[in-house]
Image: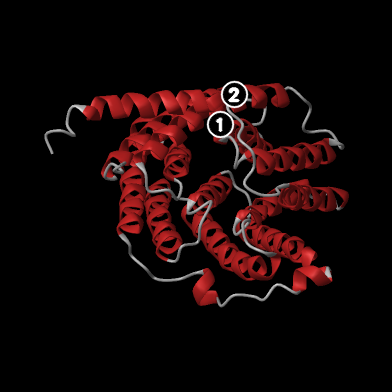
Amino acid sequence: MNNAAPARPERWTSDLRHAFTSLVRLPPSPGPRLPIATQAGLAFAVPILVMTTLGRTDIGLQAASGAFALLFGSHLPAVDRVRVIPVAAAGLVLSAAFGALAGLSSPATLIGGVLVAVASAALAFGFSLGPPGPLFFVLVFGLSAHLAAAGVDRVVSVAAIAAGTVFAWLLSALPLLRADARKTPPRPMRELLPGPRWTIDARLLLARVAIVAVIGTLAALWVDPDRAYWIVTAAVGVIGVAAHRGTALLRGVHRAAGTVVGAGLFLLLSTLPWEDPWAGVRLAIALGALQFVIELVVVRNYALALAFITPLVLLLTGVATGDVHSPGIAVERIVDTLVGAALGAVTGVLHPRRRTG
């Protein structure tokens, strides 16, 4: 025990150095990403294009939020992925419905955000849902509550998100049109989503989410209650699904750096006209392209992915609520992310140090 104590500061210094140097590294992808990236880009772009032609770009934007369902199970073969995505989709729709109900009351939104974060984390970690874990359930709850508070029709919003998840599922099933994809034997659902299994890692990850949800929400009371979901989302994103304190520090650094760059990109995009008749087409192209790039790089460099995730989410919410031209939003998101990223990284100390040698 005494021999390990002096190495502790050196270990943190080493982890911090690794986190910063990893910002400029782009390791090879662990697997092919082009098919997933293409599906994700289409899942965002097509609903917006279709609804723009019908004169309801706003509904298309809401439906695009359902595309987050497509990001689950990306490591699985198509025969298994089409059975996991509906589980994630159901969680997203429930999160959206809960957000729509809570959005008209600030206290209900704050309490609901904590409940959704903890409940989704319990299910994601307990049943080994895998990346991206509880992140998008928290984000969709916050987006839905934000739209409800802005006066958007809650029933239409939730229905649009549900439709978006269905479209995302259909896209994930397209590979099954190929005979070779159908030859892969499907695994039992109990094997795909085993659980509930409460390993020490699952319990620690759940505890971290609960901590950041509560503290992040309390911090938002001091800054701005309406921004609580962004602080908590940033913290949950840093926690991820890896139970390792070094990973927590790395993701915290990447989250902060990527958001700063992404906010700058959003400021550039926000100068474009987003109210004319062609705005819906530009939005579809922009959001589809952003999501395409995100899925190409997210497994290689988290900060680079955040540089595109940030403007995607800000465009999605900014256009829907009419705040897209407000530069203050970018500054707020940087502050919220720095708070959330620091909070998520600090909770990494709950994990015991991995022994080497």
The vertical placement of 190 against 337, above or below, is: below
Instruction: Give the x, y percent position of residue 256.
Output: 48, 28
Q: Secondary structure at mark 1?
A: helix
CB within 8 Å, label 1 to label 2? yes
Quarter that holds the N terminus: top left
Residue at 39% x, 70% y: name it. Answer: 196
Instruction: Give the x, y percent position of residue 129.
Output: 50, 61
The vertical placement of 24 against 251, above or below, is: above
Q: Is residue 215 left or right of residue 135?
A: left
Quarter that holds the C terminus: top left
Local packing at callout 1 (Cα closer than 10 Å; few below 14, some 14-19, many 20+) is many
The vertical placement of 272 against 53, above or below, is: above
Local packing at callout 2 (Cα closer than 10 Å; few below 14, some 14-19, many 20+) is some
Does any portion of residue 335 appear in the rendered image?
no
Q: CA distance from mark 1 to mark 2?
A: 9 Å
Instruction: Give the x, y percent position of residue 308.
Output: 65, 33
Residue at 18% x, 34% y: name it. Answer: 4
Residue at 51% x, 28% y: name it. Answer: 22
Q: Is residue 299 left or right of residue 193?
A: right
Q: Earlier in the sequence, mark 1 or mark 2?
A: 2
Q: Is residue 292 left or right of residue 54?
A: left
- The kind of residue on which mark 2 rests is Val
The image's mark for residue 303 is 1
Q: Is residue 40 left or right of residue 197?
A: right
Residue at 74% x, 61% y: name it. Answer: 167
Q: Quadrant of residue 172?
A: bottom right
Instruction: Give the x, y percent position of residue 218.
Output: 32, 39
- The kind of residue on which mark 1 rests is Ala
- Pick whichever, 208 or 310, lies toward us: 208
Residue sitting at the far left: 2
Q: Which residue in the structure is indicated by mark 2? A: 261
